[in-house]
Image: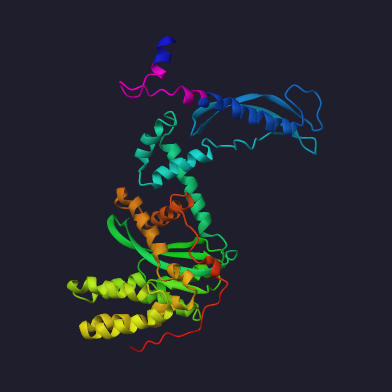
Amino acid sequence: MEETTAMTERPSFPGEDWFDPLEAAVRGRIRGFIEEMLEAELNAALQRGRYDRHGTTGGHRHGHRARQLVGTFGPVTLSVPRARLAGADGRTSEWRNQTIPAYRRLTKRAEALIAGAYLSGTNTRRVRRALGALFGGAIGKDVVSRAWHKVQTDWEAWQKRDLSKDDIVRLVLDGTVVRVHLDKRATGLSVLVALGVRRDGQKVLLGLKNMGGESEAAWRTFLDGLAARGLGRPELAIVDGAPGLEAALAALWPQVPVQRCTVHKHRNLLAHAPKKLHDELSADYTDMIYAKTVKEVDARRKAFVRKWRLKCQAVADSLDEAGPRLFTFLRYPPEQWKSIRTTNAIERLHEEFKRRIKTQCLLPCAETACMLFWALLASGQIALRRVNGWDTFHVPPAKQNLDLAA
């Protein structure tokens, strides 16, 4: 016995004392605490204590059974009470506790920890190795698979949820390309993303769909799916400027104002200018887009066009291509400009998603890409916050038109 105890408490690393008596004491009390919860639940069901003879409901106890539960406190073997309850028809049925539902082997916190480790970019084998010590070696391949299956079930339910209850005032749309295995080859697929902004300013992910590209047909299929699930017409759409997306929006909601992402347009302008002019071009563009008032933006836009028509005609033409949609944000209160000007809310999600999957190189299939993207948000790995200026949503947009003459 002394040899067994010494083996149990032996430090994990030679020369280091890793045994924590406080941790061991806390984990030792977990079993008793859970069993007390189970006994209290059964007492409430029978309406009498363990050794009481009288109760207002029929039913009787009949022993205990052993059951293992794995939580962040490690694996514990519990003594679960058993009982039979009498029904209205006089028949008895086995009592089912609600504290530990049938077939549950992991606590919700443990499931979230396993899923979170996987979503952070760790593969299944590394999840088992990393969490094996925490869970006392009780994490096997089947345990990880069951936890991940729970994520898949929630993902399928999320795809079908009703969107009519969300009061969406803005719709931010963008796509990203991920590399997946397709026919035993690495293939780039587009993931279309819809991010909504509710009237209370809270951002919410509305939809994800993998498509072969960002054509008008692809975006129309995606938007029709959102509308079929109850998404109403938004008050403003923020897009990256893809022709297919704008055409699909115009076909579905022709009256919705559209804001072209100013960051995407900046990249377009740089692509039309020699590299030696990039710094100067960026400075002029930033001064124009981030001016403090509508008049300042208008004056600097005219100056920008006049200057670059002479210096690099292609830059001026590219700016003209965006038209008034690049300046839709000017119709709204200045407090909202920061959140309207760009699709950065989605771009940040793209960057975080790709950072998390970097260690996996290629995803096994296209559907996995969308599910991982959603799961990062659902598990709290990525948080969505309220947009700037949401408390001015009640102010109607101005009907002023920007003078586009240079």
**Above or below: residue 119 compared with residue 251:** above
Quadrant in the rendering for residue 298: bottom left
Is 13 situated above or below 196?
above
Q: Nearer the viewer, residue 95 or 50?
A: 50
Residue lying furthest bottom: 405
Q: Residue 294 sits in which quadrant? A: bottom left
Against 186, residue 171 (above or below) is below
Which of 281 and 85 lies nearest the eye of the viewer? 281
- The extreme top residue here reads 2
Q: Does residue 281 appear left or right of residue 66 in this picture?
A: left
Q: Is residue 294 left or right of residue 98?
A: left
- Residue 23 inside the magenta-drawn segment: yes
Highlighted magenta segment, given as a residue range: 7-25
Q: Left or right: 385 with respect to 291?
A: right
Does residue 210 show up?
no
Residue 220 in the image, given as x and y percentages of width and height: 44, 73
Query: Which is the main secondary structure of the residues drawn in magenta?
Result: loop
219 above or below 106? below
For the image, the number of numbered tags is 0
Image coordinates of residue 373 in percent, x first then y, are 41, 55
Q: Quadrant of residue 164?
A: bottom right
State the image coordinates of residue 347 (x, y, percent, origin top left): 38, 62
